[in-house]
Image (spheres, grey):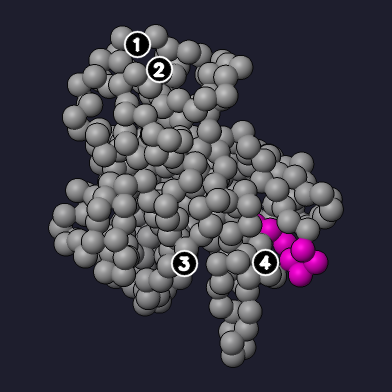
Amino acid sequence: MKLVLYRAELGLELLPGLLTERGVVDISLIVRPGHDGQQTMVNLIEDFEALRPQLEQAAAQGAAAPLDQVSLVAPLPRPGKILNCIGNYWENRERDPAPLNMFMKNPDAVIGPDDTIELPTLAALQSFMHEAELAVVIKGPAKAIDPADWRDYVFGYTCAIDVTARGEGRYTWPNKPVMSWLGKSFDTFAPLGPCIVTADEIVNPNDLHVRLWNNEDLRHDYSTSDMEHPVSEILEFITQVMTLKSGDVICCGTNHEGLGYLQDGEVVRIDIQGIGEMTLTVSDPLKRNWERGVYMGADSTNHEAVRRHRPDLERTLK
């Protein structure tokens, strides 16, 4: 199933729904309401198995509103935690895997489909970039999980764009760039959506096609099979550190091949196989400009992202 949070036409209330081929089906009378949209979706995650028969009936028979009559919002508008892998892709390089590492992103930075990425005006900022990522939605509590049981703690998946400011939030120590959360956590820098697809719909999260377009120019174009550390390993790692709760989000990192700048007036669209796509616009009050196209600097390797070479296997995908 594909679960959404939305506003009906001319409505202000956030409603839980099912995204179907017929449109969006209202399930607000089925789901235990929360004090806000986030809590309603957490309730849906925690009660899902008990509600499944009613939800399946609603998906098949419930009245559906056409997509042009509703406004989808981020399916988790204020997660308790957003955790992001650093790198985590081979990126066409023959080397040993980098150690798994993560950072936390500001949950208040979440926006959703058709929203606007607002670029901040701090003078220290040099540029802004998109990073398309698969995001895992947790069903908790999850603590020190056995990697054999990782699927028990994955409720579903959604699309994420890890918007990144270059300049502020990065520093040198000593003579080596180090990531800080600051450059990742400006308001609007965590687009999520358009839906949560339940885990049973995704056979293997490490075999999905991820793409992102900027003004219809294809930028990111990679498979999640290229992860250095798969979803199971990520969950094992982070639950040794902290307890994950229902509605927490883990972003699995990005293949930097295809990384590019974001600037005023551009339209970005992310699509992940089996989940769906969402579109956002970019606004910059200062109207700054950078070279369009794929960035080929320190954070990129080769835009031919379908070619990958691993220490244990060399293969070419066609």
Residue 25 marker: 2
User: Residue at image x 40%, y 75%?
Assistant: 98
Q: Which of marks 1 and 4 is nearer the N terminus?
A: 1
Q: Is residue 199 left or right of residue 291?
A: left
Name the element at disc 3: strand
User: Residue 176: x and y, percent?
Assistant: 58, 84
Q: Main secondary structure of the magenta part?
A: loop
Residue 197 position (above or below residue 302): above
Name the element at disc 4: strand
Q: Which of marks 3 and 2 is nearer the N terminus?
A: 2
Local crowd at mark 2 within 10 Å, few (<14), some, or many (≥20)? many
Q: Earlier in the sequence, mark 2 or mark 1?
A: 2
Instruction: Please give the residue where the numbered disc 3 appears in the rendered image.
Output: 103
Chain part drawn in magenta? 122-131
Instruction: Please give the residue where the numbered disc 4 appears in the rendered image.
Output: 166
Q: Distance between the residues labelled 2 and 1?
A: 6 Å
